[in-house]
Image (cartoon, grey):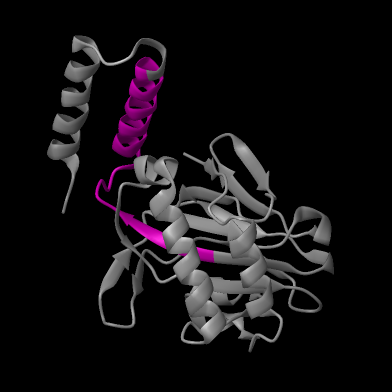
Amino acid sequence: MLLTLPDILDANDLQQARRLLADAPWTGGKASAGTQAAQVKNNQQLPYECEASQAIGAMVLRGLERSALFLSAALPRKIFTPRINRYAGAANHYGNHVDSAIRSLADGQRVRTDLSCTVFLSEPAAYDGGELTITGTGGEQRIKLPAGHAVLYPGTSVHQVQAVTRGERLACFFWVESLVRSEEQRRLLFEMDMALMQLRQAHGESAATTALTGSYHNLLRMWADT
């Protein structure tokens, strides 16, 4: 399931992020890639411990906590520390790859990458190219979202970032380990949660919505790994 998450960062967040990135200490991006991905990765990245990376990552995490859509779709158990990347000039693309299944945090914890997420920091008009291209059963999907918006998609997907031919593409990326490992089960729970929300908006609380909510939580209880 591929899902757009609007307004993870607001205008104030974006203004602060751009100020922090004005003098950012960019380095080569290959260091964070797996063996296969490193062969096709050509971008820049911020060291995760630098001020800009830490501050923007914290903004993103706060934005995710405010997003009911993200919480419903991802059912997050762990979130890999958000990282910041840049595509511009000669370091301008990332070829087809699949993200590593397991990522290690600085404290030694491991995160299973059930879901990948990109939060766009540059407005689409600020650069040419740079589409996140995800290949699935329905073919290719190309994503280029307004600044502050995010896209959430399965970590199992083959994906790439098209070459940036003008300007610069700035983004925050990270992975999510879900409480529910199965993509099919997560999709069913998400669809059920969205349907319940619509029923409540249209008809208010009722015995039927209470019963369906109970079914939702019983399924989550059955499938979740805490």
Residue appearing at x 47%, y 56% in the figure: 63
Residue appearing at x 43%, y 54% in the figure: 64
Task: Pinpoint residue 177: horizontal percent, then vertical percent.
Answer: 32, 57
Residue nearer the viewer, 148 or 47:
148
Image side of residue 3 versus residue 19, left or right: left
Residue appearing at x 18%, y 45% in the figure: 224
Magenta-colored span: 173-200
Residue situated furthest right in the rendering: 166
Magenta span: helix, strand or loop, mainly? Answer: helix
The answer, for residue 155, to whether it is visible in the render is: no
**Looking at the image, how many numbered discs can be counted on the residues?**
0
Residue nearer the viewer, 1 or 157:
1
Quadrant showing the C terminus: bottom left
The answer, for residue 45, to whether it is visible in the render is: yes
130 up-or-down from 90: above or below: above
Residue nearer the viewer, 205 or 74:
205
120 up-or-down from 52: above or below: above
Residue situated furthest front in the rendering: 12
Q: Is residue 41 magenta?
A: no
82 up-or-down from 49: above or below: above
Toward which corner of the image does residue 78 lie, by quadrant? bottom left
Image side of residue 112 versus residue 202, left or right: left
Task: Pinpoint residue 111: horizontal percent, then vertical percent.
Answer: 31, 66
Q: Is residue 189 magenta?
A: yes
Task: Pinpoint residue 173: horizontal percent, then vertical percent.
Answer: 52, 64
Image side of residue 164 versus residue 215, left or right: right
Task: Pinpoint residue 75: horizontal percent, then vertical percent.
Answer: 31, 47
Toward which corner of the image does residue 62 lie, by quadrant? bottom left
Toward which corner of the image does residue 68 lie, by quadrant? top left
